[in-house]
Amino acid sequence: MDNWEEKINTHQIDFIICVNNELYFEECKYYINRLTIPNDFNIDIIAIREADSMCAAYNVGMKSSNAKYKIYMHQDVMIRENDFLGKIIDIFKKNENVGMIGMLGGTQMPKTGVVYRAWNVGRVDWRDPDMAYIMAGAKDMPKTDTVVEAVDGLLMATQYDIPWREDLFTHFDFYDVSQSFEMRKAGYQILVPYQEIPWVIHDSGFAKLTFYDEERRKCLKEYPEYLYADGGFEFTYDKEWNELSDRLIEQLKNMIEVGMWDDVESIIRLYRKKGRKSSGLEIISILSNIYQKEKKERIDNSFFEGCSNYWDIYEKYVKIRFLLRRMELKEASKEYLDLIIAIQNQIISNEALIEIIFTSVIEKDVVVKRIEEIYKKCGREKEAEYWQKIYQIVSGKAISVAYSRRT
């Protein structure tokens, strides 16, 4: 142990990220690279690709790093708090008994093991495919740093190395809950810091939960003493819907590539009536709305121009989503210059912008006002007046807040 401790670099912070989508990973790195690094500290980013499980990936990352401070996070997490590292390190240095910090967690883990409906502490800037909002633990959560029993795996920062249970959890569920319990077994506390404004953005899709029940049962068997609270939710999983939606997504992608947009719209309309959620179908729904609105307005420069396949369309949509977010967070203009140029040169339509803004931006008034200013600056008064009217609609609207703890 003494030899290992001598090797630990107490001035190193490593980000360990499991990667299967390079678009999201690049944006994730953008936010990491803009963080303020505490004096005398260095950072590194360790990407783990083609992982068999989250626990296996994180063990690889942990063993390849001698950093005292490690931040395990999803590729779809963007850190919006510039002083995030300073805040995390300060908490760890003041609390040697705190082994791990998360952004969203819970103080009473249910005996059903359905923990994703039990988080009651923390705040996250949450971006679903079809809606942007603040995810908060509970209405009555304390306005102070809180010791919790487990944290959500979107971001988990540690100052001590505890092996991840890849021997037990072989998929991508319950790695976070297990690691929380392993930390506690080792005698360490887990903490969720108080955040008036969320420190991180989670650009998340809807979980399919394919292996959730399998991993949940393992967790119940391995950690019965930590899953004790009454009133937890039972787990439900609709295998038929997941398989159907996956097949439908592939069919719709093929239809889009051959221009069968009216048929796509008809199928999406039926999907809406089902009242179910699918990340892939929500994105296709947004794209379908853009197509139909541009068609109605007879837009010359279509959003889909220059795209030869579905991936090209998806990539364009995601990049615009990311650039609008940078605009929303009031980054310097050079950080979303491509979007400014596209707006100025009418490469992207108002219809496409509005559809993406209304489904992916929380502070819509900030973005709408900025677009109005871009049009004013390039002398496009008609468009500026159009966006001024949109601003009057969205200005003063309360930010949507959802509570993770459902009672």
Image (cartoon, rainbow, N blue to C red):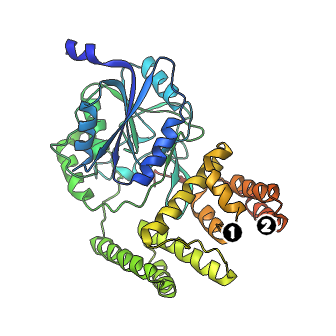
Asked whether disc 2 touches disc 1, contact meaning CB atoms under 8 Å apart, the reply is yes
Give how far across and how far down residue 215 sits, in percent: 22, 52
Q: Nearer the viewer, residue 345 or 399?
A: 345
Query: Circle 1 sits in a helix, a strand or a loop, which is it?
Result: helix
**Residue found at x 51% / y 41%:** 31
Report the disc number at residue 70.
none
Residue 12: image quadrant is: top left
Q: Position of residue 137 (x, y in %)?
A: 49, 46
Image-based side of 152 in relation to 216, left or right: right
Quadrant containing the N terminus in the rendered view: top left
Q: CA distance from mark 2 to mark 1?
A: 9 Å
Q: Is 343 left, or right, of 11 in this rendering?
A: right
Image point (63%, 82%), residue name: 295
Residue 362 higher or lower than 145, as above or below: below
Q: Is residue 294 above or below residue 112?
A: below
Q: Dot 1 surroundings within 10 Å: few (below 14), some, or many (20 or more)?
A: some
**Which is more toward the observer, 94 or 385?**
385
Q: Report whether residue 122 is seen.
A: no
Q: Which residue is mark 2?
A: 383
Q: Residue at x 69, y 61 (%)?
A: 343
Residue under label 1, please give it.
350
Which is more N-terminal, label 1 or label 2?
1
Q: Amino acid at mark 1?
A: Asn
Q: Amino acid at mark 2?
A: Glu
